[in-house]
Amino acid sequence: MMFALSFAFACNEKKDDDKQNEETKEFTVTFVANGEKSEVKVAEGEKASKPADPEKEGYTFLGWYVGDDAYDFEKAVTADVTVTAKFEEVKPEVKEYTVKFVVDGEASEVKVVEGEKASKPADPVKEGFVFLGWYVGEEAYDFENAVNA
């Protein structure tokens, strides 16, 4: 009888070990950002913790993705998965300036992108006068200079 009880107890231990192995199954969640990988182990059925948002100069971080789909950090992990940081390039702000050309009190305006040159308009014609050029105050305007204001 002692032998029978020992055998039954040993079988129960084996079942408990199997159950414990099943309960501790882990999956690898691989995070890829800026070409660097980091891995975390997550127990089956648990959620992966969201890492800190990565930074990339000249880009805005959009989120963590699996393929084209945003990764759901509220969903339990049930398999190995690779999650990639998605970025969007930041477009620099384009500044434009208004250049006014005034002839006899009549103004015409053109927009010029910062750092580019204003195109010289056609010389105005006024009977009895000779056109001397375009001026800013008392100084002749140089159309070879970039517009920065």
Image (cartoon, rainbow, N blue to C red):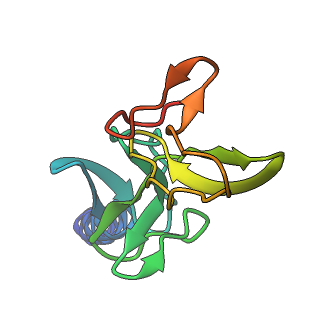
Identify the residue at image location x=46%, y=81%.
69
Q: Position of residue 67 (x, y in %)?
A: 33, 80
Q: Where is 117 relative to 135, above or below?
A: below
Q: Position of residue 126 (x, y in %)?
A: 67, 56
Q: Specify whether residue 127 is in view.
A: yes
Identify the residue at image location x=36%, y=43%.
58
Q: Name the outermost residue toward the right.
A: 105
Q: Position of residue 71 (x, y in %)?
A: 48, 70
Please tell me which residue lies in front, 92 or 44: 92
Total number of numbered discs in the rendering:
0
Identify the residue at image location x=49%, y=31%.
148
Q: Specify whether residue 25 is in view.
A: no
Q: Quadrant of residue 43?
A: bottom left
Q: Quadrant of residue 66?
A: bottom left
Q: Where is 109 relative to 16, above or below?
A: above
Q: Is residue 65 left or right of residue 70?
A: left
Quarter of the image that includes the C terminus: top right
Q: Name the outermost residue toward the front.
A: 128
Q: Name the outermost residue toward the bottom.
A: 68
Q: Position of residue 145 (x, y in %)?
A: 36, 33
Q: Where is 121 relative to 59, above or below?
A: below
Please tell me which residue lies in front, 119 or 52: 119
Please tell me which residue lies in front, 35 or 99: 99
Quarter of the image that includes the N terminus: bottom left
Q: Name the outermost residue toward the top.
A: 138
Q: Where is 97 relative to 48, above or below?
A: above
